[in-house]
Amino acid sequence: MFKETHPILGTRDVSRAIEFYTHQLGFTLAFTDNADAPNYVGFRRDAVELHMQFQFAQEMGTIRLRLLVTDPDALFREYRTRGVECTPNALRDTPWGTREFALYDVDRNALTFYRQLTPAEAQR
């Protein structure tokens, strides 16, 4: 039945969002509705696709996404190298059995990158 999902995040500035997601987070621009003045765009990195659409201030809400990744440690190092501001505590193992870190994009959408801990890691 269900095969995948494409969350739509709001942005107040599509061009600024394109810059952040492509240069800072390493996504590629998969598509745009209008190359000259985009209103709706899609980003892709590996098997993940995120959509983004311009929204007026009154339409913006709090969005929180959790993205399952194979190596949050490597991704954290990559983002730090690119100057992306991440969770103040950096990477952490959680009581609910994940290794994760988080960040906010330029529109304050919250993105958490995680993987499940192995049984041995969870016992520590």
Image (cartoon, rainbow, N blue to C red):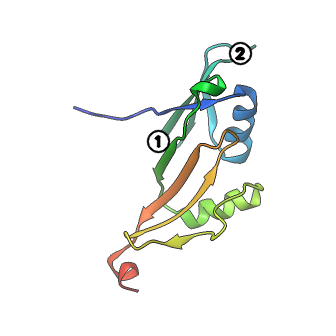
Q: Earlier in the sequence, mark 1 or mark 2?
A: 2
Alpha-carbon neighbours of circle 1 within 10 Å: few (<14), some, or many (≥20)?
A: few
Which secondary structure lies at badge 2?
loop
Residue marked by disc 2: 35
Q: Which mark is residue 66?
A: none
Find residue 100 and report its horizontal and vertical position in percent: 51, 64
Residue 62 lies left or right of residue 115; in this view the side is: right
Disc 2 crowd, CA 10 A, few/some/many (<14, 14-19, 20+): few
- Disc 1 marks a residue whose amino acid type is Ala
Q: Quadrant of residue 102?
A: bottom right
Residue bearing mark 1: 47
Viewport quadrant of the C terminus: bottom left
Which residue reaches farthest front?
58
Q: Is residue 7 above or below residue 40?
A: below
Q: Nearer the viewer, mark 1 or mark 2?
A: 2
**Looking at the picture, which amino acid does disc 2 mark?**
Ala
**SS class, disc 1:** loop
